[in-house]
Image (cartoon, grey):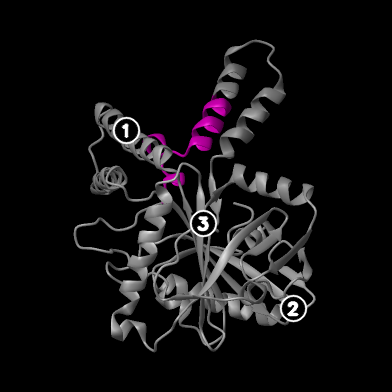
Amino acid sequence: MTSEDAPEVIGLGPSDADLRWIGVRRHQAIVVSVGVGLVGDWFLRRRASLAEVLVGTVLALGAMPVADGLTLAEWALVVVRYASRSHWRHCGVLDTGDECTVWAGPSVSVRTFELEHRGRLDLSGRDEHVARALANVVDALGAARARRHVSVHVLSDPPTTTVLALPLDARVPEGWRRATGLAPRLLGTTPGASREVLERWRYLRSRDGVLCVFRVLDYNAVAPGRALLHDVLRRAQPSELSLHLDVVGGVKAQRQAARAVHRTDSDDAASRAAGFRRSARSARHLGRLAQREALVASGRALTRIAVFVVVRASTLGELRSRSDEVWRRAHDGGLRLQRGVGRQAPWWSAQLPGGPSW
C-alpha cells in the first residue's frame, strides 16, 4: 500500500466514519443537540427538575474528544460493553485442505494462500504486480451483490510469510500457492485445536503469553508515494500485520459512493451559505469523493479498509516495551494508531483470517 497508487489518483484521506455534517460526527451532533435542549428547557420552564439540567450537561460533555480518537460518549459505551460481555474468547481453526474454518465467536470459511517470495520485491518491481493482481480480485468480488471479505496477513517472524485469505469462490491471483497450516499459526494454536483467550483492559492473555492489538486510525501524515506500513514492518522484534478489505456489493457501493458526494457537497454549500469559505482540505476531500464515485461507477470495488498490528510477548513488561516500539515507529512514519483499550477481544476476532466478527 502506498499513499498514492497513481499520479492521477488523489491519495487516501480521513475515514468516512469521522466525516459528518458540518465537520461534526453524527453522535456528537445528537448528544450536543439533546443536551443543549434539556439545559435550555430547564432555564425556560418553571419548576423544572434539577435532573434535567444534569442529564443535559452530561450529554453535552459526551461530545468532547478525549483520547484514542474517541469522544467521552464513545468511551462510556466502550466501558459498558467491556463490563457486560464475557472476557473469555474461545477461538480455533480447522483446515481441511480445501477450506479453512476460523471461529472466534462467529465462524467464517476461507481458502488460504501463501505468497511466493522471490527476494527483495521492492528491487524487482514485483510488489506492484502483486498489488495489482489483488486489486483485480477485489474488483471482481465487488461486482457481486453480497458483501465479501479479503484479508492479507504478514508474519515478520523469520522467515517472513505473507498469507492471503479469500472467499471460497474467489479467483486466486497469480503468484500465490495453496497453503495449509498457516491459519493455525496466526491463531497460535495447532490445526483442529481450539484455545481460550482472556481479555484484559489493555491486552489479551493466553497460555502461551500475552498480546495486544493495535488498529491504524488514519494515514494522513504519510508522505505521498511512501509505503504506508513500511515503518511498522521494519522492526527488530517479530510482529503480525493484517490488512482487511471488506468489499461492498456492486449496487450498494454505487449508492453509498453517490450519497457520500451528495452529503459532503451539501455540507459545503450549507457552510458557505452561513458565511464560511471552502477550505483547501474540504475541497480536496470533495474531489477525492467525486473521484471515488467515478471509479466505482466504472466497475472498481468499494471497500472498507482496516489494518491491525498484533504484538506478542511472554511477559507484560516485554509486551509494554514492544508495544511502545510499534507505537513510536508508526507515528514516526505518519501513521496514527489506536491502542484498543477495552476493545482487545473484538479487535482480536476482527483481525483473524476472513474477519469472523466483521
Are the residues flagged by discs 2 and 3 in contact, CB closer than 8 Å?
A: no
User: Pointers 2 and 1 in contact (CB under 8 A)?
Assistant: no
Q: CA distance from mark 2 to mark 3?
A: 36 Å
Mark 3: which amino acid?
Answer: Asp
Relative horizontal placement of residue 114, taking residue 198 as reference (left or right): left
User: Helix or strand or loop: what does disc 2 sit on?
Assistant: strand
Which mark lies nearer to you, 1 or 3? 3
Which residue is disc 2 drawn over? Answer: 209
Q: Is residue 185 left or right of residue 254?
A: right
Question: Which label number is shown at residue 262?
Answer: 1
- Viewer-proximal residue, 168 or 341? 168
Is 29 magenta? The answer is yes
Q: Which image quadrant: the N terminus? A: bottom left
Point out residue 24 in the picture as x, y percentages from the top left corner.
Answer: 43, 38
- Structural crowding at the residue carrying mark 2, measured as other residues with C-alpha within 10 Å and reported as few (<14), some (14–19) or many (≥20): some
Q: For the residues marked 2 and 1, what is the alpha-carbon distance in whole angstroms? A: 49 Å
Q: Amino acid at mark 2?
A: Gly
The answer to if 354 sits in the magenta stretch is no
Query: Which residue reaches farthest front?
Result: 98
The spot of residue 22 in percent (x, y) is 37, 35
Earlier in the chain: of badge 2 and badge 1, it is: 2
In the image, the segment drawn in magenta is 15-36
In the rendered view, tell whether residue 10 sits above or below residue 322. Answer: above
> Is label 3 in a helix, a strand or a loop?
loop
Q: Position of residue 212 (x, y in %)?
A: 65, 69
Q: Nearer the viewer, residue 210 or 48?
A: 210
Q: Where residue 77 sits: x, y (%)?
A: 66, 44
Please, is residue 124 above or below residue 24 in the view? Answer: below
* The image quarter in which residue 319 lies: bottom right
On the image, numbered disc 3 is attached to which residue? Answer: 169
